[in-house]
Image (cartoon, helix red, strand yellow):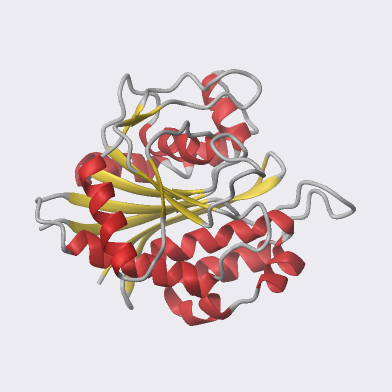
Amino acid sequence: MARITAAIASSHVPAIGAAIDNGKTEDAYWKPIFEGYEWTKQWLKEEKPDVVILVYNDHASAFSMDIIPTFAIGCAEQYQSADEGWGPRPVPTVVGEPDLAWHIAQSCILDEFDLTIINKMDVDHGLTVPMSLMFGQPDAWPVKVVPIAVNVVQYPPPTGNRCWMLGEAIARAVESYPEDLNVQIWGTGGMSHQLQGPRAGLINKAFDNAFLDDLTANPQRLRDMPHIEYLREAGSEGIELVMWLIMRGALGDHVKPLHRHYHVPGSNTAVGHLVLKPE
């Protein structure tokens, strides 16, 4: 049977991708950020996941104001890197796992979780930057990917509790898949940041670190956190952190933290990273 063996949370700052693509990872500004991912890169070589269910948000690359799905699942054979205005990132094509994706879609929909099914889309930095952080610059990605796109751009986004429940539904789907697969689930986005208005540049270290703590110590607080608290404490884009709760909900009640990294600043935001195993 397929199984979710571990989970990763990570920021997906677009400037991180630019730093990788332009050979600036050893620059004084960027080096502390990338050093925090070295442990995970080595750990992944040992874990050898077959598939990553990667939770991210699209940044007007695949979707627009015309169509805004709250939750969407990619069921395609492959996904190209999106052109976000300066050309596609020079990264490998993302290879999908359509059989598993369709199984998750069917299982979740029959579990009364309505997912929008996407059979063709390009993926932007929300997905490709985490892949680069974890795997570097290979000729081909070493895992297949099931993308889960979440609306955290246009209000109303889903609640943290709804995201958690989707994670639980995804876990049930994976556990019912008959093929023997080592599956990981990644939650991306965040942490505290605001890109516009009088509070542009906001970073709240205390909020971020409390969030990292409570993913293991008190996840119920995060499930119950209202949108207004994300806005007030973590900035307008801090709402991206609800996507981490899909990852966390898929792991069950108890988890073991394996690695943690937090650095300020990474472009105009805080960079957070966590590796968890279910217990």
Q: What residue do we see at 53% from left, 21% from top?
A: 88
Q: Is residue 116 above or below residue 76?
A: below
Q: Is residue 138 above or below residue 215?
A: above
- State the quadrant of the N terminus: bottom left
Q: Quadrant of residue 65?
A: top right
Q: Quadrant of residue 121?
A: top left
- State the quadrant of the C terminus: bottom left
Q: What residue do we see at 53% from left, 57% from top?
A: 70
| Residue 61 appears in the rendering | yes
Q: What residue do we see at 55% from left, 50% from top?
A: 189
- The spot of residue 276 in percent (x, y) is 35, 61
The one nearer the camera, 48 or 100, is 100
- The spot of residue 242 in percent (x, y) is 54, 63
- The spot of residue 224 in percent (x, y) is 56, 80
The one nearer the camera, 188 or 279, is 188
- The spot of residue 164 in percent (x, y) is 44, 70
Q: Residue placed farthest to the right in the image?
A: 198
The one nearer the camera, 74 or 193, is 74
Q: What residue do we see at 68% from left, 47% from top?
A: 269
Horizontal side of 91 relative to 110 (left or right) equals: right
